[in-house]
Image (cartoon, rainbow, N blue to C red):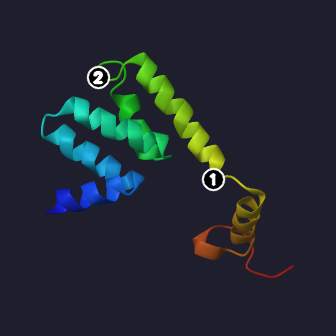
């Protein structure tokens, strides 16, 4: 039943579910399917999937596929960048939100 839910989430565009499917396929001996899932997850910006591909390069992942996944991953990361998001991160650090460093006093 768990795999069904991963599949539904992956079809819906959830990169971590796609990564989980890759792990499931790899552990069940379906290496090519696993690599395909990790490539898709990496192109959606999943860092862990990119690391899994990196570990399996060049034995299981060809140079062209790895390079394409790397470029698409960077494009996905760049697409999430914005001035507003960077300002929010700076404020979170400044005001010690989420346990990150910085001063707790308001300037």
Q: Secondary structure at mark 2?
A: loop
List x then y, in percent, for residue 7. Answer: 26, 54
Q: Is residue 30 left or right of residue 8?
A: left
List x then y, in percent, for residue 82. Answer: 73, 56
* Residue at the extreme right of the image, as rendered: 107
Tag 1 or tag 2, which sits nearer the N-term? 2
Quadrant location of the N terminus? bottom left
For disc 1, the marked residue is 80
Quadrant location of the C terminus? bottom right
Q: Nearer the viewer, residue 86 or 41?
A: 41
Q: Residues within 10 Å of mark 2 (few under 14, many from 20)?
A: few
For disc 2, the marked residue is 60
Q: Nearer the viewer, residue 63 or 13?
A: 13
What residue is shown at x 63% (from left), y 53% (from top)?
A: 80
What residue is shown at x 53% (from left), y 35% (from top)?
A: 72
Cβ atoms under marks 2 and 1 closer than 8 Å: no
Tell me if residue 59 comes above or below residue 27 in the rendering.
above
Tell me if residue 89 comes above or below residue 17 in the rendering.
below
Q: Is residue 20 left or right of residue 73?
A: left
Q: Secondary structure at mark 1?
A: loop
List x then y, in percent, for residue 74. Answer: 58, 38
Q: Is residue 5 left or right of residue 62?
A: left
């Amino acid at each position: 039943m768990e795999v069904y839910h991963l599949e539904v989430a992956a079809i819906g565009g959830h990169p971590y579910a796609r990564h989980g499917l890759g792990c499931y396929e790899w552990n069940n001996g379906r290496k090519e399917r696993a690599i395909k899932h990790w490539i898709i997850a990496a192109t959606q910006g999943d860092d862990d999937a990119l690391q899994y591909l990196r570990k399996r390069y060049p034995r299981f992942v060809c140079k062209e596929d790895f390079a394409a996944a790397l470029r698409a991953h960077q494009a996905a990361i760049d697409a999430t960048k914005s001035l507003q998001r960077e300002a929010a991160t700076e404020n979170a650090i400044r005001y010690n939100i989420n346990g990150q460093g910085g001063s707790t006093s308001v300037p």
